[in-house]
Amino acid sequence: MKRSVKSIRRLYGQQGITLLELLISMLIGLFILGLVVGLFASMIKSDSDNIKAIQLNQELRSVMSLITRDLRRAGSNRNAAVNAAVSPTNPFSEGSARLTISPNDQGVAKSCVTYAYDSTATFGTIQATELYGFRLDSDNHTVETRASGNACDDSGWTDLTDSTLVNISGLTFDESTVSEAGITVRQITITLSGNLVRDANVSRTITETVKLRNDWY
């Protein structure tokens, strides 16, 4: 006697899955896949943001390092002993050679610093090539360095930063004094701000303070 279909199912159990079970399984699979893809995309974006931040930080730090290292030389006089015997003043810390903070050629306050130090073979005598400085170019969004002793409001300065990579949004020099062992020392606080050209949301501001070693004898 032949068994009925119901009897066979009861005997061997249900075979296969229903359409509803298949749809539920597919929905669960798509949900898990969506979570994995979302996590992967988030990781890629995080890595990209970190790379951008590192690139900007390196650009700003390299410029800041150059400025701070050069400012520490301000007023340096390799012929100090001879100058001191003739005159009680340091020619690299007097008059137009003295470290001075001024507006740049666009009129932004405290965005330019000029100074001098003895760097040529003519010891103790100031040459035009021994007049140095840094300033903000507010139009091109760059940091510039002084050339041929130009004043802060002159043209002819040279770009230090690449305007195709970084927009320099701010550069300020603030002067203050600090007393150390009864000696008053001038110090310059430099604040540099910028953002990436390809992603303006990636921005950073860094600050360094430089004590002038050779301001006076």
Image: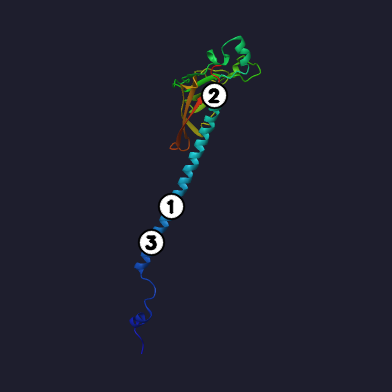
Q: Give the percent coordinates (x, y) of residue 123.
A: 64, 16
Q: Name the foreground residue: 109 vs 154.
A: 109
Q: Nearer the viewer, mark 1 or mark 3?
A: 1
**Within 10 angstroms of label 2, few (less than 14), some, or many (20 or more) residues?**
many
**C-alpha distance separating marks 1 and 3:** 17 Å
Residue under label 3: 28
Residue under label 2: 71
The amino acid beneath tag 1 is Leu
| Label 3 with label 2: CB-CB less than 8 Å | no
Residue at x 53% of width, y 14% of height: 96
Q: Nearer the viewer, mark 2 or mark 1?
A: 2
Q: Secondary structure at mark 1?
A: helix
Residue under label 1: 39
Q: Secondary structure at mark 2?
A: helix
Q: Secondary structure at mark 3?
A: helix
- Whichever of callouts 1 and 3 sits on the residue coming sooner in the sequence is 3
- Whichever of callouts 2 and 1 sits on the residue coming sooner in the sequence is 1
Q: Identify the disc placed on residue 141.
A: none
**C-alpha distance separating marks 2 and 1:** 47 Å
Q: Nearer the viewer, mark 3 or mark 2?
A: 2
Quadrant including the N terminus: bottom left
Q: Give the percent coordinates (x, y) of residue 93.
A: 55, 16
